Image (spheres, rainbow, N blue to C red):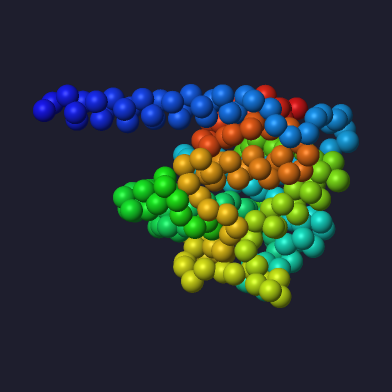
Amino acid sequence: MIRLPLRLLLAIAGSVLAYFIAAVIGAVLPAGGGSRPAEDRPHRVLMVAGPIHYDFLIPLDAPAKARFAFLETAGLQLSHPDAQWLLLGWGAREFYTSAGSYRDVSAKAVLKGVFGDASTLRADVLGAIAPAQELPAVSFSPEEYAAFLEAAAASFRRTPDGAAQALAHPGFTATDRFFEAEGRFHLLRTCNTWVARMIRASGRRFGAWTPLPYSVSLSHALFLKE
């Protein structure tokens, strides 16, 4: 009678361990483009990590403002004189849209994130970042940057007239919004694999599978450290 629960616990522990090991292997296996001199990459996108999640901080330069102009009509003030960065992150809808503290995330939201949930994008506009805040960066050539912006913009699910579809859900700040996104979220296709897909879409090399934050950090150190 005791053996069955014990076997179940061992199977679960073994699966979790295998997932974490695979997350390391996927991070070190290269995928995507090759390399080019760093001086050919004037555009820098920052990455900010939470406990389980990476976001992009995209500078609100002319190319980014032009590519994400559709977010202005959804209420994001990209043209505000103090706006300097567009924060962008992708995730499981029910989990991601929970209140700002992980304590507020329900077991149902966690299970949906593991087995499959609709996805959402969170976008916010930020001002200046403290110089002492050293964040990892991804450098792009003009061509790579255009491809990166295109991939990120294509992650939004749009109406036939090209408008982003905001969710009727409060954000975490006074200025952010949640939006309908393309693709489904699950254990093998996480917020952090989206980060890797966006980087590889530019033509830059990155880890083949990066489901966890440390996978992204490891891939960044291996392939993008400059």
Please provide percent x and percent y for residue 78: 70, 64
Asked if one can make out residue 221 in the rendered structure from this viewpoint, the answer is no
Q: Residue at x 56, y 41 (%)?
A: 192
Q: Is residue 93 above or below residue 46?
A: below
> In this orientation, which residue lies closer to the viewer: 121 or 190?
190
Q: Is residue 175 above or below residue 13?
A: below
Horizontal relation, residue 216 to residue 15: left or right: right
> In this orientation, which residue lies closer to the viewer: 91 or 62?
91
Image quadrant containing the C terminus = top right
Q: Residue at x 87, y 29 (%)?
A: 37
Q: Residue at x 84, y 41 (%)?
A: 141
Horizontal relation, residue 37 to residue 120: left or right: right
Please provide percent x and percent y for residue 52: 48, 40
Asked if one can make out residue 208 in the rendered structure from this viewpoint, the answer is yes
Q: Is residue 149 above or below residue 15?
A: below
Image quadrant containing the N terminus = top left
> In this orientation, which residue lies closer to the viewer: 80 or 45?
45
Please provide percent x and percent y for residue 79: 73, 66
Q: Residue furthest left?
A: 1
Number of marks in picture:
0
Please provide percent x and percent y for residue 117: 46, 54
> In this orientation, which residue lies closer to the viewer: 218 or 128?
218
Q: Residue at x 81, y 43 (%)?
A: 144
Q: Quadrant of residue 67?
A: bottom right
